Amino acid sequence: MIAPTPFFADRGCHVRIFEEARILISLGHRVEIVTYHIGRDMPGIIAHRIPSIPWYQKLDAGPSWHKLYLDILLFFTAVNVARRLKPDLFHAHLHEGAFVGVLLKVILNIPLLFDYQGSLSGEVIDHGFCRKGSLLARFFGWIESRINRSADVIVTSSSLATDDLIGKWGVPKQSVTTLADAVNTDEFKPFDQKESRLILNLPADVPVVAFLGVFNRYQGVDLLLEAIAILKLRAVTVHFLLMGFPDERYRLRAEEMGLGGMITFTGKVDYKDAPFYLSAADLAVSPKISLTEANGKLFNYLACGLPALVFDTPVNREILGDVGVYAQFADVTDFATKLEELIADPDRMHLLGQKGREKAVLEHSWTSRGGCLVKRYQDLIGRRS
């Protein structure tokens, strides 16, 4: 696998890489990952890292000009590993990884599967790296188009992304398959709420709302603070458990808004501890405003038996179905209102949580996803043969 990211850093993209590798290994396949110099080694996963770059320590998501030379180092590291291992195929994550994979495919004549988790040009706009319609945005769109058409097979994390690749980017329909994110329901499950709240020093008799993820604008954290402020004005009794990083700016902003007493910030949460932390909550939120990326945290919410409030987007609808609660897209007032209504209805929250857990077990298991991925591998290798 080619992972142009500081794997592992306890965020959505990394969870998909880790869980795919883990289920493939359990099915008897040999998987080794080429990645950046920083990140945490995960048990049972072999990771080959680029040479150390002391001044680059960025673990959070988002584009960076530093990636230009990091990905050059990633390419040469991948060449060395591939020549030694002689893999059956390259499984590349993200567009940067697919770009490296395209070069390797040409040089080594090894087929390439591209694991597509969102639009490259959409991502750089969402992160504020460039403006929509700018020359730089158009350049990223051109690069994205070339990469999309160069992979032998593409798997996407949502049917919306599949439709986008076929309709907008002109990728042949037979080359694209939807392989949605999933969750390990043996590890992500409800734990004792009282114990979780005691460990986290949370109020025992107040509704708790959880958020787990990267802290930035396109994940909706700015909007979430605005929604909390609305609830404070309405005198709603509630406490928020905000888990993720980098959170320094949001801690300061919450204090400036007078919200400090309503929020517990945990900072970065280890992936293995996430189910225990989530179990302290009564419900969970994801005010993500990107229309081009998956929303993997929702699978973890479902598996832990938490009702989920989200903005109404095709990706969120596809994951949650009738067990989700939906606010109008990017509408902070409606988000706050829907949240207030949920908090006031414990029976509804309990029922949605139960249905969500059932949905995670029956529909969103990594075991079934692993079988689908292996089938794509076999099709790709057979086609090349």
Image: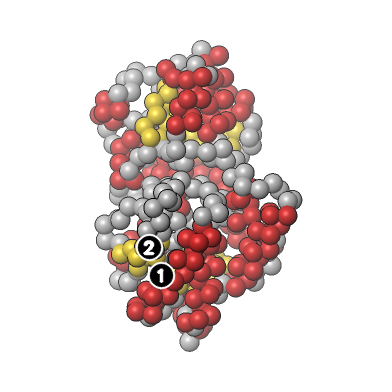
Disc 2 residue type (three-letter): Pro
Estimate the x, y position of residue 230 in percent, counting from the top left.
57, 19
Above or below, 306 against 47 in this view is above
User: Who is closer to the viewer here, 191 or 203?
Assistant: 203
Asked whether the residues under the numbered discs 2 and 1 touch, taking CB atoms below 8 Å apart as contact, a structural biologist would say yes
User: Who is closer to the viewer here, 104 or 229?
Assistant: 104
- Identified at 39% across, 26% down, the residue is 264
Q: Quadrant of residue 139?
A: bottom right
Whole-angstrom CA distance, mark 2 to mark 1, is: 9 Å
Residue position for label 2: 51
> Which quarter of the rendering shows the N terminus?
bottom left
Disc 1 secondary structure class: helix
Local crowd size for mark 2, using a 10 Å CA cut-off: few (<14), some (14–19), many (≥20): few
Residue 182 visible, this angle: no
Estimate the x, y position of residue 355 in percent, counting from the top left.
43, 40
Residue position for label 1: 77
- Identified at 34% across, 19% down, the residue is 203
Local crowd size for mark 1, using a 10 Å CA cut-off: few (<14), some (14–19), many (≥20): some
Q: Quadrant of residue 367?
A: bottom left
Answer with left or right where residue 346 lies relative to residue 224.
left
Above or below, 31 against 363 in this view is below
- Identified at 49% across, 48% down, the residue is 61
Disc 1 residue type (three-letter): Thr
Answer with left or right where residue 309 lies relative to residue 82.
right
Estimate the x, y position of residue 214 in percent, counting from the top left.
47, 41
- Identified at 64% across, 64% down, the residue is 143
User: Who is closer to the viewer here, 251 or 229?
Assistant: 251
